């Protein structure tokens, strides 16, 4: 590698260490790292702001912005309080039952929408229900972020890396559903079992609080029915447009911004009120992270690492598949899985062609998708949903540290990737 490439790696590791140890505010660390990358010419303004493969992913930024505005308006209607009481009553105040209910809803919603949108919608409900039952909110938020990443692996639209893979591999919505959805069901069962062990100290049942919850009428929580129906109508249209992306060809970011604009225009909510709930530090953190990872792409670091992994398989499909699965999980734990998949997918396409095209070699695409999606659970910055959840927690004065998330994420990632390994081997390689 060149001197610039080595400097880029050193700067990225330094910034990542500051983020992980929380010695410096994570936004400052990301922006500082991005600034230094620009100063040493590891990347430039064109690549950082306009490149599709190594720049800021504006689709992600504006998707988040639009959905945050919509959620902010929805919050004023009281619907999250309604959902919190409903969920607590269905679980009869039992903490583990409540977590299972929230995780199943999160996984299903992530498969149909995308994981970032899902956590934006489910987090406010979680805060309210945990407050009602006097439960620690951090375990629930961490588990929901991970469930969103697992559930998002089931479909083409569930996780941004899947969209990239589908485009490169010529794969359809049904391909993902047939090949990955059955495994995701198994992974969710395993994950829920892990949550019972990992978060057992959080499941403290309070009979008095539970009895109070059972006496509540969730319908009384709705503060503005007209605004609720207006907001829900826009939200349903936005979600329908997400699902119909293969037909409509509108990017999710465009749909989210249009939905937010329409909602502000047709309701009595002012612009100031609409943007009050936007997690600006989270958006800025993402921008800095994208620039830093883009510098790794621009200097060829990620490509060299990926090519070395491919060459090490020596054309053996089984070795290539399992190697790709585990290496993708490891790398996606360190860098955001979106730029990693964007860099790796052309290499996988060549490897698929070298192994006979889209026959048995198609398993390589599933290995890449599973490795990237499941590996995103390992650390607090491995997936967009994780970063969003930590940002929401910080805004609500219940911060979740990098290591608090990561100590659970490493266990969950290892367990789920370990389950995916025999699935790929038995279904595709035997």
Image: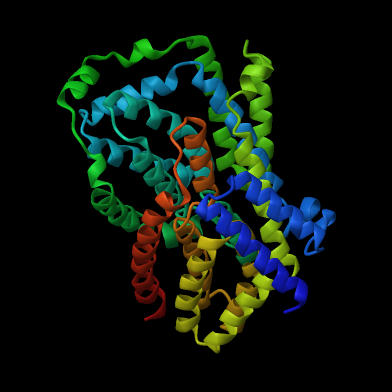
**Relative side of 225 to 102, left or right:** right
Looking at the picture, how far across and down is residue 130, in whole percent? 33, 30
Report x, y in % for residue 129.
33, 27
Residue 94 drawn above or below residue 211: below
Q: Residue at x 49, y 15 (%)?
A: 77
In the rendered image, the residue lying farthest to the left is 207
> Hey, which quadrant is residue 348 in on the image?
bottom right
**Who is closer to the viewer here, 62 or 397?**
397
User: Which residue does the image show at 34% across and 57% down from the upper left?
Assistant: 187
Q: Is residue 349 above or below residue 28?
A: below
Q: Nearer the viewer, residue 354 or 224?
A: 224
Say above or below: 159 vs 63. below
Would residue 326 appear left or right of 97 to someone viewing this image? Answer: right
Considering only vertical position in the picture, is 314 above or below 372? Answer: below
Q: Is residue 336 visible in the rendered structure shown here?
A: no
Taking the view exactly as shown, the residue that stands out farthest to the front is 23
Quarter in which the N terminus is drawn: bottom right
Of residues 178 and 103, which is closer to you in this image? 103
Its colouring scheme is rainbow
Instruction: Find residue 357 and report its image quarter.
Output: bottom right
Q: Position of residue 223 (x, y in %)?
A: 45, 10
Count of all numbered marks drawn on residues in the image: 0
Q: Position of residue 202 (x, y in %)?
A: 26, 40
Residue 55 shows in this picture: yes
Furthest residue in direction bottom, as rendered? 314
Q: Is residue 391 left or right of residue 103?
A: right
Residue sitting at x 59%, y 45%: 25
Q: Nearer the viewer, residue 259 or 288?
A: 288
């Amino acid at each position: 590698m060149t001197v610039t490439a080595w400097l880029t790696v050193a700067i990225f590791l330094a910034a990542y260490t500051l983020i992980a140890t929380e010695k410096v505010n994570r936004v400052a660390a990301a922006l500082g790292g991005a600034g230094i990358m620009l100063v040493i010419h590891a990347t430039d303004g064109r690549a950082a702001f306009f490149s599709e493969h190594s720049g800021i992913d504006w689709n992600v930024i504006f998707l988040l912005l639009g959905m945050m505005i919509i959620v902010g308006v929805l919050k004023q209607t009281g619907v999250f309080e309604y959902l919190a009481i409903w969920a607590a009553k269905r679980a009869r105040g039992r903490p583990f039952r409540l977590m299972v209910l929230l995780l199943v809803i999160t996984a299903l919603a992530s498969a149909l929408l995308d994981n970032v949108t899902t956590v934006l919608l489910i987090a406010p409900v979680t805060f309210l229900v945990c407050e009602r039952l006097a439960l620690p909110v951090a375990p629930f938020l961490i588990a929901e972020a991970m469930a969103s990443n697992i559930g998002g692996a089931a479909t083409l639209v569930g996780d941004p890396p899947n969209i990239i893979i589908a485009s490169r591999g010529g794969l359809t919505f049904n391909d993902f559903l047939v090949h990955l959805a059955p495994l995701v069901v198994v992974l969710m069962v395993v994950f829920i079992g892990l949550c019972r062990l990992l978060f057992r100290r959080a499941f403290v049942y309070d009979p008095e609080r539970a009895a109070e919850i059972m006496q509540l009428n969730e319908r009384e929580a709705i503060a503005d029915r007209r605004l609720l129906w207006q907001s829900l109508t826009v939200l349903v249209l936005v979600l329908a447009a997400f699902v119909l992306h293969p037909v409509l060809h509108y990017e999710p970011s465009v749909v989210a911004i249009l939905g937010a604009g329409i909602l502000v225009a047709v309701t009595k909510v002012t612009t100031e009120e609409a943007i009050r709930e936007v997690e600006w530090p989270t958006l800025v953190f993402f921008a800095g992270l994208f620039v830093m990872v883009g510098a790794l792409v621009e200097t060829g670091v990620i490509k060299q690492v990926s090519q070395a992994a491919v060459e090490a398989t020596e054309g053996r499909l089984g070795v290539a598949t399992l190697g790709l699965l585990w290496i993708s999980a490891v790398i996606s734990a360190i860098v955001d899985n979106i730029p990693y998949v964007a860099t790796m997918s052309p290499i996988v396409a060549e490897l698929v062609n070298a192994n006979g095209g889209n026959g048995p070699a198609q398993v390589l695409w599933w290995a890449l998708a599973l490795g990237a999606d499941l590996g995103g659970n390992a650390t607090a910055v491995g997936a967009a949903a994780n970063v969003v959840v930590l940002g929401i927690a910080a805004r609500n004065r219940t911060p979740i540290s990098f290591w608090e998330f990561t100590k659970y994420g490493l266990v969950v990632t290892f367990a789920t990737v370990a389950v995916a390994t025999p699935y790929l081997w038995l279904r595709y390689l035997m």
